[in-house]
Image: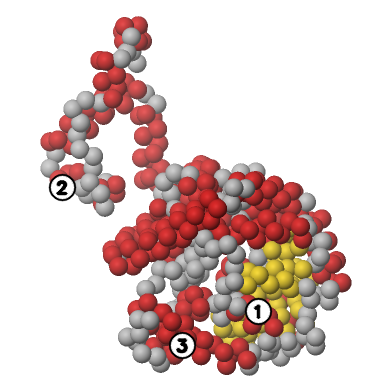
């Protein structure tokens, strides 16, 4: 796997060139944001719920070892086998060994970002295990050999015609189908025989309850329930940060999750898994994969509060107009831009700069993660670690010096204004000016605000020669 920094700007450029996809993507996500707002306004206690959710998460993370051990103890009492995975490689080995012990050659699974994070499917394929995604969006992405482009709606960047093309290739359906219901039915017909004959099933877990040793999966298609209950072997892969201490805490998050994600009051299915079904076997793999390290990072540990609702993605103007795949990572959008560098600081060094820092992501976050502030802090870290490209670093260094000297800054401003008026276009729009690649430079102005203020508002004392800088 390449370790070169993701070129988000170039990938976004390609996405912007595709007008139909860009328009659909932008409008679809903004519609989800508006539906989220409508749900928020229906609950007068919305801000209290956010405060409480944030408080519970911070309390849990502060006592994470204690609650993890409590979960393990209670889960074992429920008949669940509990495994611990330090990283993605250990997770994959554990899952592979469980499947091998049961001579399982086919695995059906519902959506799980942790398994994407661990790159599990290629690992199991090498061991002769076929993995079939049962979530519609995730299956589309699997067939198209792409990462999820959104945490909640993995194929949200695709049009109906894209899905018809993919299904025609793999399911031999009509490539001209434009009815989403017919395409969904094609997926159902293709998936059901696989589900009925699968050797094992896998789910993720939205929330883990320490006091009961149980976990909860929230879906809208019912595919997680099929994956968990049709085969006798159920494996759940869950990040260690998904804990809540008590069952009483769960209601806070259930009320926030789907409202923040899709603008619906609750997911169609909210399933509580308490232990293996009769004659079956259940395994839970608790995955660290860098989370403990992040917990020790003063500026970034609160990103572990994330409940994967995707609200920050739906509201982000950069994400809506650049598409999730442009981030080149399992996690995209604002939350991805603060999580991904914890996995690989060099490869994902460009992502914290894919933001306007407008703060909308922070405002909609149901657990009050200060996302835009962490984006800013990541930029400082990446500059300190010399992960910013040389040219950009030097330009920012010069700009900092210039802006730190008001007299020189104003002189440069006047020179720039004169240049904008007189220089030919080729001298202004070239490779030295990436800003002008997709937008026009501002029009020259006759008078700066500073000049206007000195002329109309400044007191004589402020304009005296000794006070000029």
- Which label is found at residue 143? none
Q: Position of residue 163 (x, y in %)?
A: 40, 79
Could you tell which of marks 3 and 2 lies nearer the N-terminus? 3
> What residue is shown at x 55% (from left), y 53% (from top)?
42
- Left or right: 10 with respect to 426? right
3 and 2 marks in contact (CB < 8 Å): no
On the image, which quarter does residue 239 sit in?
bottom right
- Which label is found at residue 426? 2
Q: Position of residue 464 (x, y in %)?
A: 32, 7
* Element class at badge 3: helix
Q: Position of residue 358 (x, y in %)?
A: 44, 44
Which quadrant does the C terminus fall into?
Answer: top left
**Alpha carbon distance from label 3 to label 2:** 53 Å
Kindly tell me whether residue 318 is visible in this rendering.
yes
Q: Which residue is mark 1?
A: 225
**Alpha carbon distance from label 3 to label 1:** 20 Å
Could you tell which of marks 2 and 1 lies nearer the N-terminus? 1
> What residue is shown at x 64% (from left), y 53% (from top)?
305
In this view, the mark in front (2 or 1): 1
Is residue 272 or residue 207 the one in the foreground? 272
Q: Is residue 207 above or below residue 101?
A: above
**Count of marks placed on residues:** 3
**Alpha carbon distance from label 2 to label 1:** 61 Å
- Which label is found at residue 186? 3
> What residue is shown at x 15% (from left), y 45% (from top)?
425
> What residue is shown at x 44% (from left), y 88% (from top)?
170
- Left or right: 99 with respect to 144? right
Is residue 374 or residue 252 the one in the foreground? 252
On the image, which quarter does residue 144 sit in?
bottom left
Could you tell which of marks 3 and 1 lies nearer the N-terminus? 3
Q: How dense is the environment of label 1, judged by Cα within 10 Å: few (below 14), some, or many (20 and up)?
A: many
């Amino acid at each position: 796997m390449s370790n070169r920094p993701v070129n988000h700007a170039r990938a976004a450029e390609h996405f912007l060139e595709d007008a139909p996809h860009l328009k659909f993507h932008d409008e679809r996500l903004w519609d989800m944001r508006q539906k989220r707002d409508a749900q928020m306004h229906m609950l007068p206690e919305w801000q209290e719920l956010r405060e409480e959710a944030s408080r519970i998460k911070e309390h849990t993370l502060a006592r994470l070892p204690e609650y993890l051990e409590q979960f393990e103890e209670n889960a074992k009492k429920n008949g669940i086998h509990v495994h611990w995975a330090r990283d993605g490689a250990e997770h994959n080995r554990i899952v592979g060994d469980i499947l091998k012990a049961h001579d399982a050659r086919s695995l059906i699974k519902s959506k799980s970002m942790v398994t994407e994070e661990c790159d599990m499917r290629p690992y199991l394929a090498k061991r002769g295990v076929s993995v079939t995604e049962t979530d519609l969006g995730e299956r589309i992405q699997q067939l198209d050999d792409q990462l999820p482009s959104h945490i909640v709606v993995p194929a949200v960047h695709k049009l109906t015609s894209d899905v018809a093309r993919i299904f025609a290739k793999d399911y031999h359906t009509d490539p001209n189908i434009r009815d989403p219901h017919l395409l969904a039915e094609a997926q159902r017909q293709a998936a059901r025989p696989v589900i009925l004959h699968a050797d094992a099933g896998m789910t993720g877990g939205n929330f883990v309850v320490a006091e009961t040793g149980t976990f909860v999966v929230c879906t809208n298609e019912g595919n997680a329930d099929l994956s968990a209950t049709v085969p006798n072997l159920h494996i759940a892969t869950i990040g260690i940060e998904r804990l809540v201490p008590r069952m009483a805490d769960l209601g806070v998050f259930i009320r926030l999750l789907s409202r923040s994600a899709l603008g619906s009051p609750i997911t169609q299915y909210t399933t509580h898994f308490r232990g293996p079904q009769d004659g079956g076997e259940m395994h839970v793999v608790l995955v660290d994969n860098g989370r403990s390290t992040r917990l020790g990072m003063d500026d970034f540990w609160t990103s572990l509060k994330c409940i994967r609702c995707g609200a920050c993605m739906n509201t982000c103007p950069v994400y809506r107009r650049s598409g999730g795949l442009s981030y080149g990572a399992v996690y995209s959008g604002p939350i991805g831009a603060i999580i991904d560098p914890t996995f690989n600081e060099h490869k994902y060094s460009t992502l914290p700069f894919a933001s306007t820092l407008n703060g909308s992501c922070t405002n909609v976050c149901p657990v009050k993660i200060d996302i835009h502030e962490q984006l800013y802090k990541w930029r400082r870290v990446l500059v300190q670690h010399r992960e910013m490209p040389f040219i950009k670093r030097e330009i920012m260094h010069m700009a900092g010096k210039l802006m730190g000297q008001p007299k020189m800054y104003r002189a440069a401003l006047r020179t720039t204004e004169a240049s904008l008026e007189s220089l030919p276009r080729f001298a202004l729009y070239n490779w030295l000016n990436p800003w002008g690649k997709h937008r026009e430079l501002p029009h020259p102005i006759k008078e700066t605000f500073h000049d206007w203020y000195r002329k109309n508002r400044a007191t004589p004392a402020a304009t005296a020669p000794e006070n000029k800088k």
